[in-house]
Amino acid sequence: MKKFVLAIFAMVFVFGVNGVSAQMKDDNPMVGGAAMYKTKDIVDNAVNSKDHTTLVAAVQAAGLVDTLKSKGPFTVFAPTNAAFAALPAGTVDTLLKPENKALLQKVLTYHVLAGNYDSKSIVKAIKKGKGTATFTTVAGGKLTAKLDGSSVVLTDEKGGMSRVTIADVKQSNGVIHVVDAVLLPN
């Protein structure tokens, strides 16, 4: 009987710890090899993602760090380093020059929505719009969202498309959705 009780206790302990571990993993998803903590703001999380070093450098060059550390809430469609690398040669270097700060700010804020839009609310808006939802960005431009299977695909004002590859990365001041292409305003 004693062995049976010990066996039950051991099973409960193992499954309980694994359940807590799985829950912690869900609460702090990995992006770019780093855990994203919902208690940290957008900037404090992004600086730890090895997949977003170009985005972080751009946010710093544009002078948007304080904005993205503020209360928000914000929804950020965060392009990866690969997304920036896919732009025409020299584009990123040109955008990062001090004389292009206003243009860089426009491009970056085109990836930001005022408010907290998780994937569920984006999909709901797409369904309500009979397959399409249009969102106004902080830059004042429009992004169109559609579903491709179960993936949200964004279309910018120039017709460029970007797929959400990691959704619903909660932050203390909003949510990040990782995207595979840089979105460009008119």
Image: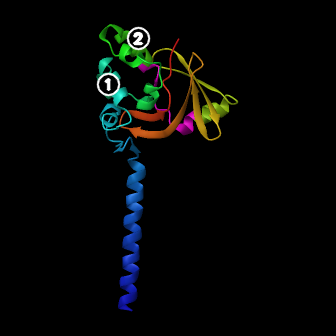
First in residue order: circle 2 vs circle 1: 1
Q: Which residues are magenta?
A: 108-122
Mark number, residue 57: 1
Q: Residue at x 29, y 23 (%)?
A: 66
Q: Is 109 part of what is drawn in magenta?
A: yes
Left or right, 153 with respect to 60, comes to: right
Q: Is residue 161 visible?
A: yes
Coordinates of residue 20 in the picture (x, y in percent)? 38, 60
Front in this rendered view, residue 138 or 52: 52
Q: Amino acid at mark 2?
A: Leu
The residue under the point 43% across, 51% down is: 26
Q: Position of residue 91 (x, y in %)?
A: 42, 16
C-alpha span from label 2 to label 1 = 15 Å
- Under circle 2, the secondary element is helix
- Mark on residue 4? none
Q: Quadrant of the N terminus?
A: bottom left
Q: Residue 2: horizontal and vertical position, in percent?
A: 35, 90
Q: Residue furthest bottom?
A: 1
Q: What is the three-letter code of the residue carrying label 1?
A: Ala
Residue located at (68% from left, 30% from top): 131
Label 2 sits on residue: 103
Residue 71 shows in this picture: no
Q: Relative to 77, say whether 61 is above or below.
A: above
Q: Residue furthest right?
A: 130
Q: Is residue 24 above or below residue 85?
A: below
Front-lying residue, 65 or 96: 96
